Image (spheres, rainbow, N blue to C red):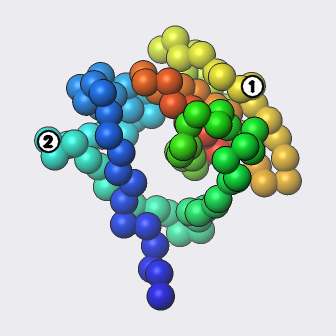
Amino acid sequence: MIKGFGGIFWRTKNLEAVKKWYSEVLKVEINNWNMTIIKPDLGNETIFSFFTEDDQYFPTEQQVMLNFQVYNLDEVIKHLEQIGVPLEKEKETSEFGQFIWIKDPEGRLVELWEK
């Protein structure tokens, strides 16, 4: 029944600052309608997962966490270092891939994942 995600929408306190951050830090090109279209590559997956309200995987005060797949996590880390964005969680490797966390301008954790 479900073909895929149609979008991710959330409210922000400072639209221009958040747009700028996502553009500069994650290279997400935000257009005049305050959106972008990310067209997945073949083999890309979107995970839809629930966590209990007391799960400690990400902060309990944060209702939603974005996870972006990246091509090369080491290159992303170099980019983040060059522009001064600190890692909130050092690179972690598991059977699911490699992960890091960063924070957006409003303090939301964003997970970056190389499969």
Circle nearer the N terminus (1, 2): 2
Q: Is residue 102 above or below residue 81?
A: below
Let me know if residue 31 appears in the view.
Answer: yes
- Answer with left or right where residue 74 lies relative to residue 46: right
**Do the residues bearing badges 1 and 2 touch, measured as CB atoms within 8 Å?**
no
Report whether residue 20 is seen. no
User: Pointer 2: what residue?
Assistant: 32
**Which percent across, then down, holds residue 61?**
58, 34
Residue 101, horizontal then vertical, whole percent: 64, 31
Disc on res. 63: none
Q: Residue at x 43, y 24 (%)?
A: 106
Disc 1, SS: strand
79 over 52 or under it: above or below: above
Task: Residue lying at the far bottom in this picture: please name it.
Answer: 1
Residue 35 horizontal side relative to residue 52, left or right: left
From the viewer's side, name the closer residue of 45 and 56.
Answer: 56
Answer left or right for 112 relative to 99. Answer: left
Residue at (53, 69) in percent of width and height: 42
Residue corresponding to mark 1 = 90
Quarter assignment of residue 31: top left
Q: Residue at x 31, y 55 (%)?
A: 37
**Depth check, front residue: 7 or 63:** 63
Q: Quadrant of residue 60?
A: top right
Amino acid type of disc 1?
Glu
Residue 72, image quadrant: top right
Q: Give the farthest residue toward the left.
A: 32
